[in-house]
Each structure stands twice: as structure tokens, then as C-alpha cells.
Amino acid sequence: MKTETAASLGKVTDKLQGWLDALIRNLPNIGVALLVLTISYFISRLIFNITLKLAKKQIKQTSIAKLIARFAAVVVVLAGLFLALGALNLGKALTGLLTGAGISGLVIGLALQGTLSNTISGIVLSFRKNIRVGDWLETNGYAGEVIDINLNYFVIREADNNTVVIPNKMIIENPFKNYTLTSKIRVVVECGVGYESDLERVEQVTKDTVSKIYNQEELGKEVEFYFTEFGASSINYICRFWIDGHSGLQKLQAQSKAIIEIKKAYDKEGFNIPFPIRTLQFDNNLKVENNK
């Protein structure tokens, strides 16, 4: 019994002694690995700061700029880790780590396919110069001011102050209209005048009224006026003019102001803006019988 115990203790002692010898032999490699990891850590911090500054110059979204900077820093740290494992002669461990990382990445990518798609779309949107925070955009059936471009979603504030959250993927895959890309907006006013009106005078008064409010010569444009139809109660027309602006709200404000001033001018000139009239004709010979 004592002999077996002594033999077991001897094996344990030999094993520990072997580990100690291996540790002593690999001390230079361990030192090199620790040095590599330390250097890679500080380099990653430096890369993070440099990348963040460069990204902020091109991207207004701070969250996306930080994401790009972190990605660059992680790449540096991983490179240092692989070099450290190589210095320790852990080839099998390095191969296993790469294999595991590949499999894990595949599984995570499949599980988070929608999220990753929106994230990548958010990064793409941040580099597009035709979409910026503060622009007035119309897309996916919504129109409003862009108030945020996040990593996963796109936020629009509509004219009625409602907030619409749209996945970034839908912005990338669907057409959009950006009113801010142009500095001029065309405004259309539709109206009608009575059949007794002097149409040429109506046209002149309307053009003069709009021109006094919004000087078209400064914009290099002119007021357009066209009669469109003989309506049921009036002769209808459209009047088109341009304003400096880039949002739907500015367009509505200009349209409202033009309608007010046109109405004042018509009242002064005595022009009639008729409303639909329905004439009901009753037959005097119509008899009504009451059923009893």
C-alpha cells in the first residue's frame, strides 16, 4: 500500500517538475507574448483615436464613427493575440481559435441577419452625401425632417410632429425624394373664377399679386398661369411659382400666403370665386299618396 502511494506521489511530482521545466524553458516566449499583447493594446488605443477623428470628419453620426473606430481597434488586438499565440508555439490552439471564430461568426451572422443588414445599411447611409440629418425627406410613404440616422433605424419627424422610425434597410432598398438637395421649391395654387370674369385681367392680377410676394426675377424664374377647364361653376386655373426653401412646411406656408393675397386682390377687383351651386327642380303636379 505504501509502495503504491509513493509511486503515485512520484508521478505527480514528476509531472509538476516537467511543467516547471517547460515554464522555465518558455519564459522568453511568454515574455515576448506579453510584450506583443501590451504593445498591441496601446497601438489599438492609438488606432481608435486616429480612426475616430478621421471618421468624424466624414460621418456626422457619432455612434457610427465610434463603431468604425472600435472595429479598427479590435483588428489590431486580434492581430496581437495571434502573434502572441505564435510566439508561444501554440499552433494547434491558434488553428482551433480561427476555426471556432469562423463557425461562431457564421452562426451569429445567420441569427442576426436582419440586424446586421440594418447596421450595414446605417453605415452606408452615413457616407451618402444625399441624405443628412436635418434634410426634408419623402420615403416609404412618409415625409418629414431627418432627425437621426442610427445604426439600426432611420428617424423622421413629420409635419404634424409625429416621429416615424424606419429600418435602415428599407431606406437603402426603396426610392426617396430629398427636398433639401434643391434650394428652390415650386408652389402650385389652384382656383376658379366666375364665367362673367375678364380672364385676361384675372391672369394679370394673379401674376402681379404673386410676384409682389415672391420676386421671381431674383430666382431666375417667372410666375406661370394657365386656365385648365370650364368647370361646373367656374373657369379653373393653376398658378405656379418658385420660392427659396427645401421643406414641405415652407411650401405650405408659401401656398397659404399666396391664397390669402390672391383673395384680397380678387375682392378689390370684384372678381367672383364661385362655389358649386345645385339647383333642385320640383314638379308641381307630383302627387303624394299616403298609404293607410
Image (cartoon, rainbow, N blue to C red):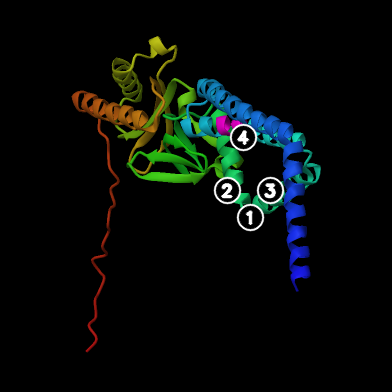
Name the kind of residue labelled 4 in the image.
Val
Of tags 4 and 3, which is closer to the observer?
Answer: 4
Which disc is residue 74 wearing? Answer: 4
Cα–Cα gap, marks 2 and 3: 14 Å
Q: Is residue 97 left or right of residue 70?
A: right
Name the kind of residue labelled 1 in the image.
Ala
Name the kind of residue labelled 3 in the image.
Gly
Please give the residue where the numbered disc 3 appears in the rendered image.
105
Q: Quadrant of the C terminus?
A: bottom left
Cα–Cα gap, marks 4 and 1: 22 Å
Instruction: Indicate the position of residue 16 as horizontal and vertical percent values.
Output: 72, 51
Q: Residue at x 57, y 34 (%)?
A: 123
Q: Residues within 10 Å of mark 2 (few under 14, many from 20)?
A: some
Q: Residues within 10 Å of mark 3 (few under 14, many from 20)?
A: few
Q: Residues within 10 Å of mark 1 (few under 14, many from 20)?
A: few
Of tags 2 and 4, which is closer to the observer?
Answer: 4
Please give the residue where the numbered disc 2 appears in the rendered image.
115
